[in-house]
Amino acid sequence: MLLVVTGDADHNALQTEYYEEARNMSNSTNEGELEQYDTTSTGPTSSIADRLPELPAEVIEDASQEDSVEWAQGMLQHYSPGSIHEMPDYGITLQIISEDTARCISIYDHGYCMFMLQMVITTFQRAGLTLEVDPHTVLRPYEAPEEQEPEHVTPQAASSNGFAIEVV
């Protein structure tokens, strides 16, 4: 329904007309007709585990090295339950649950971060430990950092000279 409102329009009359039209639509429209307009996804959302890549054999071997296994065991023994272990270079945040269990509470939505999480999971498995992922992990949006110029470098446009030297 398209309604053109002028300055002379009676607000109460318009409101009444709107409500009557809405009531008529709801009485004449059944659930089946409305479902065709519903675009809400009712299917399962993809889990973090479903998004993790398969690791090549050499990466699995690296993740299974003794020093990696000792790192995972030492981390869980070092922290008390509830403590947070940040892995900023990997975009991963873990929460310690017990001496043999940690939980990934957040990860950035980036392929490298997913790859590294799969490596950490593999290390935990080789160490006989548990790293919980779904449904606890929050997928954080990845935003590429802005490139910054070093402070001591003067941008070429700000230079008072009419020439520039290119270093190759």
Image: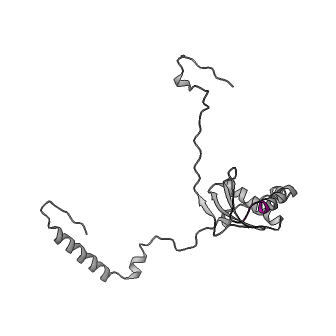
| Residue at x 23% of width, y 72% of height | 18
The residue at the far right in this view is 66
Q: Nearer the viewer, residue 33 or 97?
A: 97
Q: Is residue 81 magenta?
A: no
Q: Nearer the viewer, residue 117 or 88?
A: 88
Q: Position of residue 165 (x, y in %)?
A: 63, 20
For the record, the magenta segment spans 75-80
Compared across the picture, whether 15 is left or right of 100 comes to: left
Q: Is residue 130 visible?
A: no
State which quarter of the image contains the N terminus: bottom left
Q: Main secondary structure of the magenta part?
A: helix
The residue at the far left in this view is 8
Q: Position of residue 151 (x, y in %)?
A: 60, 30
Q: Nearer the viewer, residue 54 or 63?
A: 63
Q: Is residue 78 magenta?
A: yes
Task: Give the image quarter of residue 15.
Answer: bottom left
Q: Is residue 149 visible?
A: yes
State which quarter of the image contains the C terminus: top right
Q: Position of residue 149 (x, y in %)?
A: 59, 33
Task: Give the image quarter of residue 161.
Answer: top right
| Residue at x 71% of width, y 66% of height | 81
Total marks drawn? 0
Compared across the picture, whether 35 is left or right of 116 comes to: left
Q: Identify the coloring.
A: one colour
Q: Nearer the viewer, residue 134 or 60?
A: 134
Q: Position of residue 138 (x, y in %)?
A: 60, 63
The residue at the far front in this view is 80
| Residue at x 73% of width, y 63% of height | 80
